[in-house]
Amino acid sequence: MMNKKIWTALLLPFALSLAALPAEAESIPVQRKAVISRKSSPARRVLPQRNAAAPKAENKTSSLGPDVEVGLLTSGEVTVTGLADFKAESAGKVVGKYGNGTRLSISRSGNTILLNGKKAGDKVYLTTGNSAPAFAVKGNRYRGKVKLIPSAWGSGVTVVNAVPMELYLQSVVPAEAVPSWKADALKAQAVAARTYAMYHKNGYRSSGYDVTDDTRSQVYSGVSAETESTSRAVRETAGEIVTYGGKPIDALFHSSGGGYTENSENVWGSNIPYLRGVKEAYVGNPWTKTVPLSSFIRTMNNYGYGVGSLKGIKLSKLRIGEAHRSADRGVSGRVKSFTLIGKNGSRTVPGDKLQSIYGLDSTLYDLNVKGSSLIITGYGYGHGLGLSQWGAEAMAEKQGNGRDYYKTILTHYYTGTKVEKMY
């Protein structure tokens, strides 16, 4: 049985002794995934809403996989520069041909796209016909095609990069992992990123694309992000995704689990069978946040958690790397809630509320009082669901041997899954 002793932080000399909490089970993009602690993605990603009535993407499958349509920007007027000879097409007809280096000023009149002031159509594709860097947009170079459409939410133009999956991943993986990591860790990231993109295709279809280029989906900045090691990881896992019951999973990932990952219901409220908490070898260094007690009490009052004269904080003790069974923590030890005890009664504070207020790296923390300060000591970075990126690197450092060990990493973090080749 797990230790059910309750740790109580007494804040005043006359503080009351607090009763033990009962042990019970208790059950959101994220950034979806917080990424490597070069400080990248946020602790949570906002999941795009799926709309069954939305039009389907016009994606084709090739040896490089299906096209992924990435929303780059929406503006009243945008500029796209060709990095090779290119043409503009609308409704199956060529509406313009341009030489290498041509800069197009793109605007809109009603529902018609204008190229250098000339009407081109309500949906325009710019193509070069090859997979080399093709277009420059907002300071980045992109492979594939550019799709120009009227913004669905205003009077501007939306610029979309339609790029084959494998070329898309060549930019995503180095943005979501460290290129100097072991090959098996990079391969695990490549498969997770591919799976994530497959699962979330059409996630922003009502806006005219599949995914965004930022942490709401996956970070994507075109050719400049590509590195040899990460591109190799993409090539050597081409077409592979993680499946559960024969379907792509929502392959969430985060920077560090801090010794144990979390169950989905303790983060997003719903039980997803392949997002179960698992023990990991990597813990990492603890992080701390020191808050004056007077400021903490005032902040809690401002957020509706005032209890009068504060006497204590009730929270079960964190045990790094162990499964937890207390009602106030998830299986990993991430705080679901803690209780403030005061003269006017008690108030329960959600663990992620404290994270939001103070910008904590995760909800895997302990609370201690020293003198006139509250010390928050925590571990990990991110929401703790799915693949732990630093945990994957630790596994690869210890066991990776170039014999598909990345599949073991993936099935460790995604419970009950398989790695399958889809194309």
Image (spheres, rainbow, N blue to C red):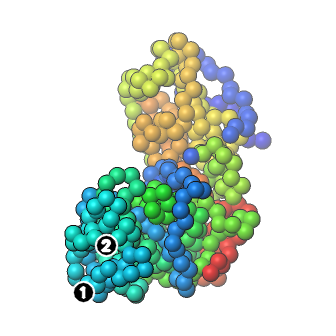
Residue type at the position of mark 1 = Gly
| Position of residue 162 measured from the top left corner of the image (x, y, whole percent) | 44, 73
Front-most of 123 and 391? 123
Residue type at the position of mark 2 = Ala
| Position of residue 6 measured from the top left corner of the image (x, y, whole percent) | 65, 30
Q: Element under label 2?
A: strand
Residue on which disc 2 sits: 120
Q: Residue at x 44, y 26 (%)?
A: 303
Quarter of the view holding residue 250: bottom right
Q: Residue at x 64, y 49 (%)?
A: 264
Q: Is 318 on the left or on the right of 108, as rendered?
A: right
Number of other residues with Cα within 10 Å of mark 1, as a class: few under 14, some 14 to 19, many 20 or more = few
Q: Which mark is residue 99?
A: 1
Query: How far apart are the two marked residues, 1 and 2, measured between alpha carbons?
Result: 17 Å
Q: Can you see residue 3?
A: no
Q: Kindly indicate whether the residue at mark 2 contacts the one at mark 1 (C-beta within 8 angstroms).
A: no
Q: Can you see residue 123?
A: yes
Number of other residues with Cα within 10 Å of mark 2, as a class: few under 14, some 14 to 19, many 20 or more = many
| Position of residue 299 measured from the top left corner of the image (x, y, whole percent) | 40, 26
First in sequence, mark 1 or 2: give its number: 1
Q: Residue at x 24, y 86 (%)?
A: 99
Q: Which mark is residue 23?
A: none
Quarter of the view holding residue 319: top right
